[in-house]
Image (cartoon, rainbow, N blue to C red):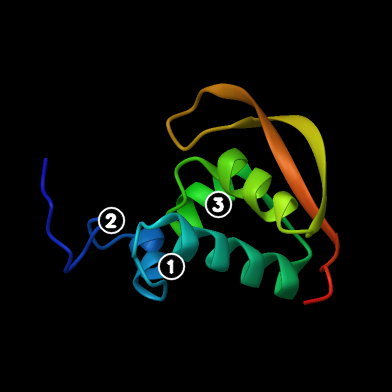
Amino acid sequence: MSHSKENPAGGNQRGALLMNVNLNNKAVSQRQRLLEFLQSHGRISTLEARAKLNVLHPAARIFELRQRGVKILTFWRTDVTPEGFEHSVADYVLLQRAAE
């Protein structure tokens, strides 16, 4: 397994998306990426958060955002992973951001 930071996704389309993202894996950075994505797109799925934002445990980051007052709804659906497996995944929808 390679730990190269030059091209974390092997140069494919997913890699192009990740190259535009700060790959800092600290929880605070992951929360910020999720919140910014939700603010600009309104929703994100578990699989999208992993692939586009490099957030491997989106549910934990969503939980933390909710604890900070961000209003997010969860809807469940079945989706297919890039590897071809069906899974129940969450769609997170931003209602409103808490006043700071």
Task: Tell which of 36 and 100 is nearer to you.
Answer: 100
Task: Report how far apart the C-alphas of labels 2 and 1 lie in the structure.
Answer: 9 Å
Q: Please name which of the two marks, 3 or 1, marks the residue nearer to the observer.
A: 3
Sequence order check: which comes first, mark 2 or mark 3?
Answer: 2
Task: Tell which of 98 and 44 is nearer to you.
Answer: 98
Q: Give the residue type at disc 1.
A: Leu
- Do the residues bearing badges 3 and 1 touch, measured as CB atoms within 8 Å? no
**Is the C terminus in the top left, top right, bottom left or bottom right quadrant?**
bottom right
Residue at 42% from the left image edge and 71% from the top image edge: 21
- Do the residues bearing badges 2 and 3 touch, measured as CB atoms within 8 Å? no
Q: Secondary structure at mark 3?
A: helix
Q: Give the residue type at disc 2.
A: Ala
Residue annotated with mark 3: 49
Q: Quadrant of residue 6?
A: bottom left
Residue annotated with mark 2: 9
Residue annotated with mark 1: 17
Q: Quadrant of residue 41?
A: bottom right
Few, some or many C-alpha atoms within 10 Å of disc 3 (few <14, some 14-19, many ≥20)?
A: many
* Side of 57 relative to 39 (left or right): left
Disc number for residue 45: none
